[in-house]
Image (spheres, grey):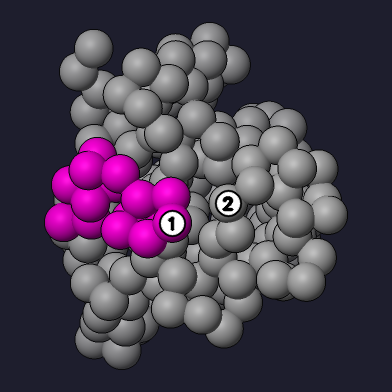
């Protein structure tokens, strides 16, 4: 079994409150990755905050920019990404699971993948990560899943990720590589 994890490809990280040109540029590559995905399952994480609570959290105090407020346009998946996922589910019969998270890494995703691995007759061959931001949520989720499933091949497609800055993107990729996560399509 092969799994694709799409991390936080939400409007606020692409062209909204925390958007960057690099994130905007990654959208097409992520959509192609989804369309060409030859695995069985797509997992999606969505950064999910509540307006009344966000600025009171540690994250909100250190990053006082409201973003991905549940139910808003910024919280929704990018239209191109949502369409690619829809086609993968409907046309190609891929299973899709969504994980809302209020922090960088999704323990729920890790628990789900461990449970899935335990109940399958075949082991998880590979888990591929794409998305935003390389240096915050992608690295957090990739390392979390690596800790939960240390013998599973974890891959990050660098061409389908973007960091807060190009330098922090590269730093995160180097850190993941040092932690035995396969990094593909990385041009330093």
Rendered residue at 78%/71% (across/down): 52
Horizontal and vertical percent position of residue 61: 75, 42
| Segment colored magenta | 13-28
Q: Name the element at disc 2.
A: loop
The image quadrant of residue 159 is: top left
Along the polypeptide, which appears first: circle 1 or circle 2? 1
Rendered position, 149 above or below 51: above
Label 2 Cα neighbours within 10 Å, binned few <14 / some 14-19 / many ≥20: few
CB atoms at circles 1 and 2 under 8 Å apart?
A: yes
Q: Quadrant of the C terminus?
A: top left
Rendered position, 173 above or below 103: above
The image quadrant of residue 119 is: bottom right
Which residue is disc 1 drawn over? 17
Residue 17 is covered by the magenta coloring: yes
Rendered residue at 22%/72% (across/down): 80
What is the number of the mark on residue 53?
Answer: none
Which residue is disc 2 drawn over? 65
Between 39 and 82, the residue placed more toward the observer is 82
Mark 1–mark 2 Cα distance, whole angstroms, equals: 7 Å
């Amino acid at each position: 079994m092969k799994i694709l994890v799409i991390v936080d490809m939400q409007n606020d990280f692409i062209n909204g409150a925390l958007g960057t040109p690099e994130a905007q540029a990654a959208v097409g590559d992520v959509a192609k990755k989804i369309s060409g995905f030859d695995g069985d399952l797509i997992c999606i994480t969505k950064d999910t905050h509540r307006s009344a609570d966000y600025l009171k959290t540690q994250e909100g105090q250190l990053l006082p920019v409201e973003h991905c407020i549940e139910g808003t346009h910024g919280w929704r998946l990018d239209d191109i990404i949502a369409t690619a996922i829809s086609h993968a589910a409907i046309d190609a019969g891929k299973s899709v699971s969504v994980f809302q998270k209020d922090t960088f890494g999704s323990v729920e995703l890790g628990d789900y993948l461990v449970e899935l691995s335990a109940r399958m007759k075949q082991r998880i061959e590979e888990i591929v990560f794409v998305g935003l931001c390389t240096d915050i949520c992608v690295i957090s989720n990739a390392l979390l899943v690596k800790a939960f499933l240390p013998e599973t091949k974890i891959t990050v497609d660098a061409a389908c990720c973007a960091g807060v800055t190009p330098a922090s993107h590269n730093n995160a990729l180097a850190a993941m590589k040092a932690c035995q996560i396969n990094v593909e399509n990385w041009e330093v």
